[in-house]
Image (spheres, grey):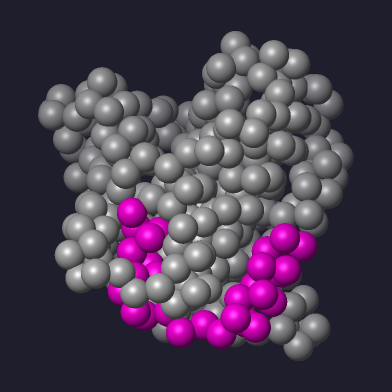
Amino acid sequence: MEAAVILQQMCVILVLVVIGIWLYKIHILNDGTAKNLSWIIVNICNPMTLLSMVTGGTITTTHSDFTVGLILCALLYGFLCLFGMAMPHILRVRDRDQQRYYNVITVYTNTGFIGIPLAKALLSGNEMIYVILCNILFTLVFYSHGILLLSTGKDRFRIRNLINPGIIMAVLALLIYWFDIRLPKPCVSLITHAGNPTVFLSMILLGASLAKQPIIKSMKSARLWIFIGIRMIAFPIGLVLLLRTAGTGGAAVRTYCLMMALPIANLPLIQSEKEGRDTAFLSQAIMMTTVVSFVTVPLVMSILF
């Protein structure tokens, strides 16, 4: 993967984020409209994007490669859960709440809201099946392991948390891929049009979110900088080198490397707010890792691919 191509795509993404910041500053986007647009993205655009990945005829991955990718993804999230337990000790975090937060932000990167549009811009169509897998595993692990870490007992794991448009469309996409189902052209066109706004809307909303945060103040946390170096740079690089040493490579490894180099997911923040916890640290960590990712993602991907 050429560094120039990655930088070009990241610059496009960055411009869209800046547009979002500008729209928020001139009050075209506000908290109310951002909330409504976020609902549309999460429940319509992103799910339709997942579905459009397999209806466009660009995925030619064999069932054998898919199975290997599924096993790799499951092992990856299993290891991340263990790594999350170790991270607070590596960083010498003493506060119990921050230990919990460092645990959860080690495991969960933003594979949906940021990962899907970024993957669409940087990866080939054939690699999107692994993006779908990553989002399915993310959902399954978060609504079990993540909820267990963050809840105080009143919002434990529930099966109904797994029944949402994202997971439904992802599973449907896997069925279409596996059984090579051909949808009528009008259906394919509808799915494509519904998914196309994902990149633009996601990035301007990200910009609106960043516009509300004190960026300079957040950048002063030395511990978060160490976390970024370990989790967003060293970990994806080490992951790829390990898999290559084991004789595994190709599209799945490249996709999972991108997914692991992404900034922190928003779901831990949302869950913690539901629990009534102090979420200042999570907001700071999400903002800081998101800003830094515009440098770290091209760096990691250009070094390895």
Height in image: 236 above or below 97? below
* In the displayed structure image, the side of residue 191 where residue 160 appears, left or right: right
Residue 13 placed where, x, y %?
30, 57
Height in image: 73 above or below 222? below
Q: Residue at x 68, y 64 (%)?
A: 73
* In the displayed structure image, the side of residue 32 where residue 245 appears, left or right: right
Height in image: 60 above or below 277? below
Task: Quarter of the image for the C terminus: give it.
Answer: bottom right
Is residue 31 in view from this perspective? Answer: yes
Is-magenta flag for residue 181? no
Q: Residue at x 25, y 38 (%)?
A: 21
Q: Residue at x 38, y 40 (%)?
A: 42
Q: Quadrant of residue 186?
A: bottom left
Is residue 25 in view from this perspective? Answer: no
Give, as a single range, the part of the protein colored magenta: 48-76
* In the displayed structure image, the side of residue 67 where residue 179 appears, left or right: left
Residue extending farthest bottom: 247
Q: How many marks?
A: 0
Q: Residue at x 33, y 54 (%)?
A: 48
Residue 60 placed where, x, y %?
46, 84
Instruction: Give the dominant element type of the magenta stretch: helix, strand or loop.
Output: helix
Is-magenta flag for residue 62? yes
Q: Quadrant of residue 214?
A: top left
Residue 76 placed where, x, y %?
73, 61
Height in image: 214 above or below 170? above
Residue 136 placed where, x, y %?
57, 53
Q: Quadrant of residue 246?
A: bottom right
